[in-house]
Image (tube, rainbow, N blue to C red):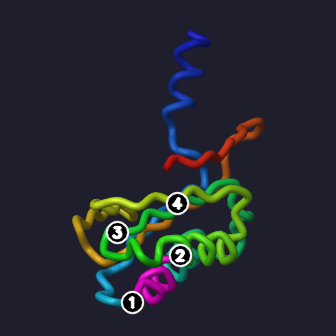
Amino acid sequence: AVLASRQAAALAPAAGFKSICSGPHPNDASAALDEALTLLALTRGADAPTPDLAVLTVGLPFEASFEALVDEAFERTGARTLVGVLGAGVLGGGQERELAPCVAVAAGTLPPGSEVAPFSLA
């Protein structure tokens, strides 16, 4: 029974973890990120704690802006760790966009004792 409850806890979403996907913003990666971060802040609420982890997913049309978007998202979220992903599909806030000029941001707190170890893949 203990193992089953641990597995259920591991599969449950972390409390306070929210995600948002921007609308399409052709040729304006900064506006897409600004929209997603603004909506995420509203969704998380003014009293939300500083996120332990944030995940930024950038749509392939914004590949040239990827590094600048990661830097800005890291600064604006205040997250202890930010993971940046570039992909053909972007998911967030219950929405999915394929090959669209948009971004998604997820952020929240992790259960006590959790550790995140970021790394790079090239």
Q: Give amino acid for label 2.
A: Leu
- State which region is magenta: 28-36
Figure label count: 4
Numbered tag placed on residue 69 in the rendering: 2
- Which picture quadrant has residue 52? bottom right
Q: Nearer the viewer, residue 55 or 68?
A: 68
Which numbered disc, 2 or 3, marks the residue that appears first in the sequence? 3
- Which picture quadrant has residue 89? bottom left
Question: Residue 36, position in %: x, y?
Answer: 47, 77
**Helix or strand or loop: what does disc 4 sit on?**
strand
Numbered tag placed on residue 84 in the rendering: 4
Dominant secondary structure of the magenta stretch? helix
**Helix or strand or loop: what does disc 2 sit on?**
helix
* Mark 3–mark 4 distance (CA, rounded to whole Å): 11 Å
* Mark 1–mark 4 distance (CA, rounded to whole Å): 18 Å
Q: Which residue is mark 1?
A: 28
The question of residue 29 being in magenta is answered with yes
**Helix or strand or loop: what does disc 3 sit on?**
strand
Q: Nearer the viewer, residue 52 or 63?
A: 63
76 left or right, relative to 38: right
Q: Residues within 10 Å of mark 4 (few under 14, many from 20)?
A: many
> Farthest residue toward the top?
1
Residue at x-position 58% and y-position 49%? 120
The question of residue 23 being in magenta is answered with no
Which numbered disc, 2 or 4, marks the residue that appears first in the sequence? 2
Which numbered disc, 3 or 1, marks the residue that appears first in the sequence? 1
- Which picture quadrant has residue 94? bottom left
Residue at x-position 60% and y-position 50%? 15
